[in-house]
Amino acid sequence: MVTLKQIQALDAVVREGSFQAGARILHKTHPSVINLLGKLEDQLGFALFDRSGYRTTLTDAGQAFYQRSLRLLDDHVALEDLARHLGQGKEARLRIVIGDVTPLTETLQVLRSFAALHPQVQLDLGFENLSG
């Protein structure tokens, strides 16, 4: 089973460009990161890295796996944010009903700004005909 620690190690090595630099930002030893990613490669059945050159680079399969793993890391961060907000008693969903007399362009601009500032809040928009 692929673990979050393995994905985080993969991300650190790719972003930093080497196993040693990746280990440093993870506050782990260089051999422990090599071991962690070696086990991941064994589990996957393919090499993530081309180790033949001076710099550590991803194989084509490694690149495809890494790109997909970034979504998992983003989801992990979003889940932690949601848990923190729920723990603070903050609402995770906001329902807004827009009437036909509401200035739509301005309202949508405000909602876009709100969503950008509060990505953990799910906006649930509705529309009602109020003019009769």
Image: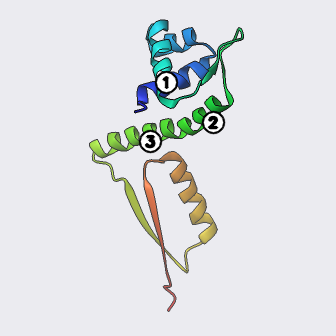
Closest to the observer, 15 or 88: 15
**In this picture, is 130 found above or below 28?**
below
CA distance for labels 3 and 1? 29 Å
Q: Where residue 49 sits in the image (x, y, percent)?
A: 62, 21
**In this picture, is 12 found above or below 116?**
above
Q: Where residue 87 sits in the image (x, y, percent)?
A: 27, 42
Residue beneath disc 2: 64
In the structure shown, which secondary structural element does the residue marked by tag 1 occupy? helix
| Residue at the image position 58 percent from the left and 32 percent from the top | 66
Residue beneath disc 3: 78
Q: Where residue 124 sits in the image (x, y, percent)?
A: 45, 64
In the structure shown, which secondary structural element does the residue marked by tag 2 occupy? helix
Residue type pointed to by label 3: Ala
Rate crowding at label 3 as few (under 14), some (14 to 19) or many (20 or more) other CA atoms within 10 Å: some
Q: Residue furthest right?
A: 53
Closest to the observer, 75 or 7: 7
Report the disc number at residue 42: 1
Left or right of 109 in this view: 121: left
**In this picture, is 13 found above or below 71?**
above
Residue type pointed to by label 1: Asp
**In this picture, is 128 found above or below 64?**
below
Select label 3 or label 1 by which is in front: 1
Rate crowding at label 2 as few (under 14), some (14 to 19) or many (20 or more) other CA atoms within 10 Å: few
CA distance for labels 3 and 2? 22 Å
CA distance for labels 1 and 2? 17 Å
Confirm whether residue 88 shows in the render.
no
Dividing the picture into quarters, in which one does residue 103 lie? bottom right
Marked residue nearer the N-terminal end (1 or 2): 1
